[in-house]
Image: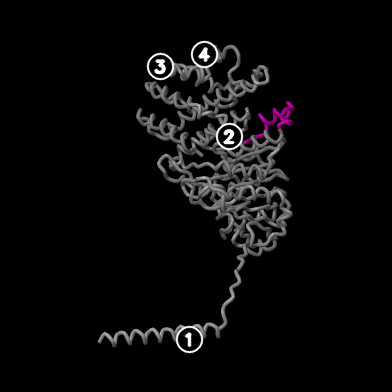
Amino acid sequence: MITGSIKNKIDAIWQDFYNENMAQTSEIVNQLTTLMFIKMLDDKQNEIEANAAMIGIQPKQSDLVFKDGNYKYYEIINGEKQLAFEIPYADLRWKNFKNLNPTDLARRIKNYVVKFIKDPDNESVGQFGNYAKRYSFGFDDKERLLASVVDKLSDDEFDFNKLDLMGDVYEYMCGSGISGQYRTPRHIIDMAVQMMKPKLGDAIIDPAMGTAGFLIEAAKYIKEHQAKELLNVKNKQYFQTGMFYGNDNDPNMARIGYMNAILHGISNPHFSMDSLLENENLNSYYGKFDLVLANPPFSGSLVESATNGKVLSITKTKKTELLFVALMDLLLKPGGRCMTIVPDGVLTNGNAAFISLRRELIDKQKLIGVVSMPMGIFSASSKKGSASKGAGVKTSFLIFEKTNNGGTDNVWFYNMTNDGYTLDVKRSPVDGSNIPDIISRFDNLDAELNRKRTEQSFMVPVSEIREKDYDLSFNKYKQIEKEEINYRSTAEIFKDLKKTYKEAEELMGSLEEMLNKEV
């Protein structure tokens, strides 16, 4: 999350836009994140070149965005592909144009750099051009503003190799709720990824990807834990072009997600701006995936006529929090697993649609666990100091496996009370996070069978869950350990009362004597 000096620097950039009468949030986000992406491309190449220099080799041209020689941009003119311009790749790099005067800076970015990142034939940025079709350069007659923003983004603290700043900045800028978007905190994403342990060969999808946080962290996990396997050419190719899928029908979110993917080594992710809940969009995704990681929208609705029939066959509802979980069930192949955040109503609501979904996961698939999270997990301070939309929602993680023939025996419940941050808007770090314990216990579920219902986690037999109308609330099964209280005997209490009464009589007598003397 954005804090401290980075927060202050983003505020200063935001103020620059206001000073030039650019006050529309969506336009500021659009322009700023595109400039950030341009800088991130150069930051990434700087890192590649530095690592190669350390071992005395030249980096492979195929690994570079800005290659040796010249970049050639073609346009279709009168039905023929013709060269529009040619420019050294070096001139497209942030570090080589950031100090130009405002007029030349604007001309370089508008006429060359923007066309470079939007070029559909530019393999260095994959299919990014498809996600940037609506982007247009917004600094005409605002060259001073552009120069100021570029100068501030050139600060050494904005090193995009070190932090997932793109998503964090987006969350911060839109935290007032104007966009209705909020991101899953990275440490919560990390927890889910460490529990699910994605691996090479998996097909992974987030059908409500936002800025692609779950997918990016899954990629990082694989890079860390299977570095040797990634040296294999086929493995690396699958990682870059065949492994990661995502969907988000918000063009800005999809564009930022794509930026993040490219900059984390996923050169051609399978991202789409089509909603898989609607019509027949699901057909080419059905039963295809080994792992689903997601935090889908809460409290939305979708008319039945636009909803995919397969999804409705699991839960007949308009509520997106139910439809998305049903969708995830359908996305998985047998043996595939899902870990998704849901509002707690999905676990407890007695409406037929809610029970139907829970029955699907418990009776037809294998429900593995429920991790209850405290209210306030999604609190995030905004530019205006308010909490992000969704901050007051009580949520849990649902974990299940696709089997198509049941298999639920015991369901694991864990009650998270501390995620390592205060549960107010400030979200300040605190000691005592439950997350390491959650991961450790999940990695050894057999040992959980011996835990008592008075502990922070325990197992519940599926038969008991069915008896309670498929309720998946932690508190439904939690046992409160009553403290034994030893009361005094009646005789002892009566003895104390007599003593107190006698002392009161003596006190009243003394007071009466004092009053009589005064008279």
Does dot 3 land on a helix, a strand or a loop? helix
Closer-to-camera residue (65/50): 50
Q: Earlier in the sequence, mark 4 or mark 3?
A: 4
Are discs 2 and 3 less than 8 Å apart at CB?
Answer: no
Q: Which residue is mark 4?
A: 78
Label 4 or label 1, whichever lies nearer to me, is 1
Residues marked 4 and 3 touching at CB (< 8 Å): no
> What's under tag 1, amino acid-wise?
Lys
| Residue type at the position of mark 4 | Asn
* Residue 387 pos. (x, y %): 45, 46
Amino acid type indicated by mark 3: Thr
The CA span between labels 4 and 2 is: 31 Å
Left or right of 151? Residue 365 is right
Q: Identify the residue at image location x=48%, y=84%.
A: 497
Q: What secondary structure characterizes most of the magenta part?
A: helix
- Give the mark nearest the N terminus, 2 or 3: 3
Part of the protein shown in magenta: 227-246
Q: Label 2, on which residue?
A: 272
Tag 2's secondary structure? Answer: strand
User: Residue 347 or 162: which is nearer the viewer?
Assistant: 162
Question: Which dot marks residue 103?
Answer: 3
Do the numbered discs 4 and 2 sit on residues whose CB atoms are within 8 Å?
A: no
